[in-house]
Amino acid sequence: MGFTGSTTHKIERKTMTATAQAAPTTGARTQWKLDATHTSVEFSAKHLMITTVKGRIADVEGTIEIDEKNPRNSSVEAVLKAASIDSRTTQRDDHLRSGDFLNVEKFPEIRFRSTKIEGGREEFKLTGDLTIRDVTKPITLDVTFEGETKDPWGGERAGFSAKGKIDRRDFGLTWNQVLEAGGVAVGNEIKINVEVEAIKVV
């Protein structure tokens, strides 16, 4: 026995309604470009188990796409030039660029691509794939939206701050020295602190 026309229409309407409810809500998307001169990517690690050494990746570029209606549908991509690492000590920076650590000649770029955003507009968790030395691992950053304003030239700018951490050994950065007194020369936990200023382009 087949369906009547009325029953078929009811089923079609229910299917369309269910599909509409399941589909993610997407609004107008705006594109933003990182302002490298006002963006910083800093890191810190323990030295000799007693002090903290800080540094930064100076050369960074990236884009942000913001879904104005549903920020969770937004996305972030960033590229950092590994050779621009700067810890304020030439000898240490040369070592960090070498094969013991970043091996910048073979792996010149550090990349981040977002995969998920959770939370509200003001504070949220940004999860993405971080690639160092051709090894890709997930990382989650705690992000705060710092505000939006117009610059003196009529452009629109937005600010974000983010914090996270990784275990450097997950990316093949395993070099270390064992100390006579116990412990190691370089801590394995790397803390990351990011300050972003982005310019609206679309």
Image (tube, rainbow, N blue to C red):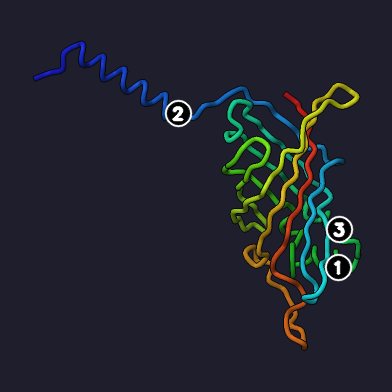
Q: Tag 2: Cα neighbours inside 10 Å, few (<14), some, or many (≥20)?
A: few
**Secondary-structure class at tag 3:** strand
Would residue 14 appear left or right of 76 to someone viewing this image?
left
Residue 5, quarter of the rendered image: top left
Look at 68% across and 58% down and name the residue there: 165
Q: Position of residue 3 (x, y in %)?
A: 15, 17
**Dot 3, how many residues are within 10 Å of its Cα: few (below 14), some (14-19), or many (20+)?**
many
Residue 182 versus residue 139 in the image, above or below: below
Answer with mark 1 or mark 3, whichever residue precedes in sequence: 3
Q: Residue at x 78, y 66 (%)?
A: 98
Q: Which label belongs to residue 92?
A: 1
Secondary element at image label 1: helix
Badge number at residue 86: 3
Residue 147 % position (x, y): 77, 34
Badge 2 is on which residue? 23
User: In the current view of this chain or complex, which residue is farthest to the left?
Assistant: 1
Viewer-proximal residue, 141 or 176?
141
Check disc 1 and give the amino acid type. Arg
**Sequence-wise first label, 2 or 1:** 2
